Image (cartoon, rainbow, N blue to C red):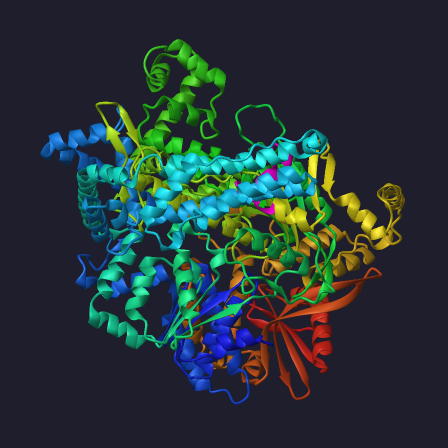
Amino acid sequence: MQWTDAQKKTIETRERNILVSAAAGSGKTAVLIERIRSLVLEDKIDIDRFLITTFTNAASAEMKARLEKSIREQMEKPGADRQFLKRQLSLMPRASISTFHTFALEVMRRYFYVTDLEPGFRIGDDTAVSIMKNESVDELFDMRFSDDYDRFSAFLRNYSSDRSENRIKQNIIALYDEMRSIPHYMTWAKESTEKLGSDSPSAALKLDEFVVKETARQLKKAAVLYAKAADVLEEAGIEGLFEKAQADAQLIADMISGDGERDMSVLSPVERISIFGRFLSTVKFNQMRATKDQKDDYALVKDHVASLRKNGKKILDDLRGRYYQRSMSEYDEELDLLYDDTRYLTGLIEDFEHIFKQKKNDKNIVDFDDVMHYAIDILSDDLVAAEYRDRFRYIFIDEFQDSNMLQETIIGRIAGKDNLFMVGDVKQSIYKFRLAEPEIFRAKYALYAQESEEESIKIDLSNNFRSKYAVTETVNTVFERIMDGYDGNARLKCTIDHQYPGMDTECHIMLPETQDSGNGSYDDAKPEEKIILKLIRESLGKEIYDVKQGVYRNVEYRDIVVLSRSRSGIKTLERFLNNEGVPAFGENTGGYFETVEVQVFTNLLRVIDNISQDIPLISVMRCPVFDFSVEELAAVRIEYRDGSFYEAVKGYTEGGADEALKEKLSRMLQQIAYWKELKNTITLEELVRILLYDTGYFDYCSGLPSGKQRISNLRLLVEKAGQFEQTSHSGLYGFISYIEAMKKNNLSIGEAKVIGENENVVRVMTVHKSKGLEFPVVILTGMGRSIRARGAGSGSVMHKDFAIGMPHVNRDEKWHRKTLLQRVIEAQKANEEFEEEIRILYVAMTRAMDQLLLTGTVKDPQKLEDTVGIGRSFIEMVYGPLTDVAENVVIHEDSEEDGSCDDTRVHSRARIADVFGMSRESADDRLRELIDERLSFEYPYMDVSGVKSKYSVTELNRLRQEELAENAGKDADVMSDIYAKAAAGELPDGRGERSTTLAQPAFSMERDRISSMQTGTLMHLVVEKLDFAEAAAHGRQYIRETIDRLCEDGTITDEEAAAVRIDNIEAFFRGEPGKRAAMSKHLYKEREFILRRNVKGADTIVQGIIDCYFEEEDGIVLIDYKNSYAGNEERERELVRMYEGQIDIYREALEIASGKPVKEAYLYLFGSKKFIAVK
C-alpha cells in the first residue's frame, strides 16, 4: 500500500508519545493496524506486550481479526520467520485488544483480593442495577426520617415537591451518576463544596472567570448580527443607516477588548464584570430611520435588518438577565447561604452510595461504572502499576477523542514516558452522554504541538480517501464557518481523482404541513418524508465511480442511508418507505415492551402469576392462545356483573347458560393452573420457551405481517428471562416486576435485529449509529429541528469544573431562584452540548462518499437569513455557508399528494444563465427545450434493460441453470428450487425415498438449532481460519483448538461451535487434493475477484470469492466447498451439473489473473466427506 508522508511518519516513529489527529476518511484504522503490524513483524515485539484499547467490542474483534490475517499472510511469504509468527498466533487469544472497560475489568479480576469483592463477582444487569438504586434511595429516606427527622424534613420542605419526594430522590441518583465520571468523586464533592464556604465562592470556584469569558463570547455573537445588518444596508446602498449600524456593531466589538478607557486584559475578573454590567445596563443603539429619499430602498430590507438587530439585542438582554442582576458580592452572599445545605446534600449522596454498594455486595455484583473506579483504586498501588508498566511495551488508544478522566487516570498510572499512541478526531467526539471529554484531546494536542515537548509529537492526517471532491468541499465550506479551530490542518483534502468529482450537494427546505397550529411544533415529517422518497428514487440508477472496485456502477438501495439526529420518527419513516415500495430498514429505537406480541405474551405471564388481574386476563383470552370472541367475553360479564373478571369466569364455569362456553372456560382455567404448577418445577427460561411453543403463539406471530421481526422479539424475551435468572432475583413474579421497572424507568430495549449488513435496503439510522460507516449517498433529515440545551430545572445540578449547585429557596416568601453557580453550570453544559451538536453534524456529513442530500422543515425559510451565527438548528448552521457558494438550495413551497412540489431553487436560474451564457429570459426557454428533449427520449437498449450492472457468481450460475432447464424443456422454477436446495445442502441423499412430509418450520425448532445453510457458513469459516499444514499434521486436536479460539475471541458462539462437524473437516485433509493443498507453498483461501462478462448481449461485472486454490508446477488446482451430501454417483453427477457453471467462472478468473491454467477443479462435499472432480 502507498502511504502518504504523514501516514508513514505515524507508522515508523519510535520512542515517542504520539497523538494522531485523523480526520474523517483519512485511513486511521489502516494506519493504526499497520503500525502495530510493523512493531510485531519488524521490531519483533510479542503481541501480548501491547495494550490496544478500542471504543467498541466490535472494533476490538475487527482489530484482532485484521492483525491475525496480516500475520497469516506474512507466514505465506518466502523467508518468513514461521516460528515467531506461530508464536504470535498462539499469543493472540491472550493479547490485550479490547475496550477500555474490558481492560479495567481484567485488572479487577486479577486483583480482586485487594478490594471488597468476592472472586465470582459479575456485572449487574442495567435494569437490576436501576431497581437497586431506587430501593437504595427509598431506604436512605426511611433511615433519615428515623434518625434525623427534623433536619431532613426541613431539607425536604425546601427542595422536594409538595406532592412527592420522588423528584428529590431522582435528583440524588442523577447527581451520583454524574459524579461518577470523576476519579475519586466523593473527595471532589466534599472539596468543591468547601469552596462555597470560602470568603469569595465565585473566585474559589472560578465562576467569575467563566462569566467574563461567556460574556465576551456572547458579545461577539451579538456584534456579528449587528455587523450583518450593517452589511445588508451597505449592499442596499443606504449609506446613512449603514454608518449608524456599523457604529453599533463597533460599539459592541470594542467592549470585548476595552471600554474605550482601559485595556480589559489587564483587569481582574471582578473589574471586567463591573464594566460589562455597566455597559449592558446603559447601552443605547442608533434608531434605524431612513431619510425620505431612502425610504423605498429601506423598505426592501427593513424587516431583514430589524430581525438581525433584534436577535442581537436579545443576546444582550439574555446576558444581562443571566449574570448581571446583582453584584458579585451579592452572588457570593447567596452561595454562602447554601453552604450548609450543599454539605447536607453531599452527605445524603454519600449515605446513598453506602446503601447501594452494600446491596451490590450482597448479590456479589458490580455495575458498569464500578469497574473503572475499582481499576483506579487497584492501580493506585505503585507495585501493581509498575507490573503493568513492565508488561506493556506499547499502549494504543483508538478513538481518543472519546476518552474521559477515568481512562486518563488509568493510563497515567501504567504508561511509560514514550510508549503512548493515541489516535482520534476531536471533530467527531459525539459521546458526551457516555462521559466523553473532548477537552482531553484538545489539551494534549496543544501540549504535543509545543517544540519543547521532546518525548511527544502530534501528527495530522487530513487526506480524505473516502469522499469525492463535491462532498469534501461542502464539508469544508460549512465547518470553516461554524466550527472553532477548523483551520488548514483540519480541512479535508480530497485524494480521489477530480475526474470523479461526485454529485453536487443539495439542501431541501420544506414548510411544515400545518403552519397555523400555534403550538410551535414542527415534528410533522410528512412533507419531508415525501422529499426523502423522491430523493431516493432519483438517486437509484445514477452512475457512480466505485473507488474500491475501480469501476463505474449504478446506485442501489444499499448505497443509500437516511440519517437522523434523533431516534424519533425513524420507524415511521421506515414504514412509509416500505409502504411506498422502497425496501428500508430502520435502526432499533426502543419500544420493545410496547410491541403487541410482547405485550400479549407478558400478559400471559402475569395471568399465570396472578389470574385476578382483569386487563391481562381479558387480553390473553382475546388473543389466539385461547381465542375468545368479544361476544363470549360479554356473555360472561353480563351473567356475572359483580367482582373481578376472573370471579365472573369462575362463576360462569359453574352456572353459565352456554355449555360450550362453560367447557371452553374450564379448559382455559385448567391450562393456566397447569402452567402455574409447572413454573415451580422448571427454570424461568424453560417456562417462557414452553409457553411460546405449546400455545402456538410463536407460530401464530410468524404468520403475521412483519412475522420475522415479531418472532425475533419473542426469542429476545426468552433470552431476557435467561439473563434475569442469572441475577439473584428469581421467579416469575420477579421477572414481571423487572419488566415493569424497565418500563417505569424508561430503560430502552430495541427490538431484535433481523437484517444482515449486506441486504439491499435503504438504511435509516441515527447519526451516532452511523459513526465509522460510509455510504455513497447520505440523506440527512430533520435538520430543521431545534437544538435546545437541557436546563437545570428546579433541582440541583453539578459540573466537574465547578461544584454541586443548588437553587436558592425562600420557603417563607414562597420563591426560589437559580444561583450564579447554577447559571454558570447551565451555560457551561449548554456550550458543551452546542459544540457537540456541531460535531454530530460533522460526523453526519462526512459519512457521504458521492453525494450529500440535506432536508429540513422550517416554518419561515426567509428568517434563515436573520440567524447568522446563532445556529439553533442544523439548517441554520448550513444555510449561510451553502447559499454563499452553492446553487442547490431548494425551498419547497408546497407538497402535493403525489409528492410533487412547488420549488424555489435559490440562485438556480442564475446558474443556468451562467452555464449557457445567456440572459435569464432565454435561460427559461432553453430549460423548456431541455425538458422536452428529456421527456421524448427513447431508450435504445430495451432488450437488455433487465440485465444488472453487477452479478454474483451464484446469480450467474442460477441464470445458467434456468437457461439449461428451459432448453431441456423443464420448468425453470423447479430447477431454481433444486439449485436452492443444493446450495443449502438439502438435496435428497439417495439413501431412501423422497419424503412428501413438509419440513418443520425454522421458527418452531429449538432456538439453538443451527440450519444447514448456517452450518455451511460455519464450516467455510473454520476451514478459512485453519493453517492447512498444521491441520494435516495434527488433525482433530488442532481443528478443535482453532474452533475454541474462534469462540474465545467472539467470532462464533458456543452453539455454533457445537454445530461444526470436525470429522467432516478432518476428512478434507485425508483426501488427495487436501493433502496436496496442505503441502503447497502457494496456497490461497477466500480470495475475492471481479470479472467482466457478457450477459445477454450486455457487458456486466461478476464478483465472487474463491474458497481455495493452490499452485503446482504445471498449473492451478481449484477447490470449492459445499455443505452437501451425495449418497450415490447419480447424486454426485447432479451436483456437478449444478455447480459446473460456477466453477467455470472461477476457472476463467484465475486463468486471466495468473496467466496459468487451472488443471484440476474439485467440489469438496462436507456432508459426504469426499472430493468430486469437476471437468
Give x and y (percent) for residue 623. Answer: 47, 28
Task: Give above or below for 851 relative to 73.
Answer: above
Q: Which of 1143 and 424 is in front in this view?
A: 424
State which quadrant residue 823 falls in: top left
Q: In which quarter of the image is the N terminus?
A: bottom right
Where is 608 relative to 687, above or below?
above
Q: Quadrant location of residue 931? A: top right
Decide whether residue 799 is among the magenta residues: no
Please state the total of marks drawn on the protein image. 0
Range shown magenta: 859-878
**Residue 94 place in picture, x, y as percent:** 36, 71
Residue at x 52% of width, y 40% of height: 872
Using the image as rendered, state which of residue 889 and residue 774 is in the foreground.
Answer: 889
- Return the residue nearer the eye: 52 or 992: 52
Which quadrant, please, contains the C terminus? bottom right
- Residue furthest out toward the front: 261
Q: Percent x, y for residue 106?
A: 30, 64
Query: Is residue 874 on the magenta stretch?
Result: yes
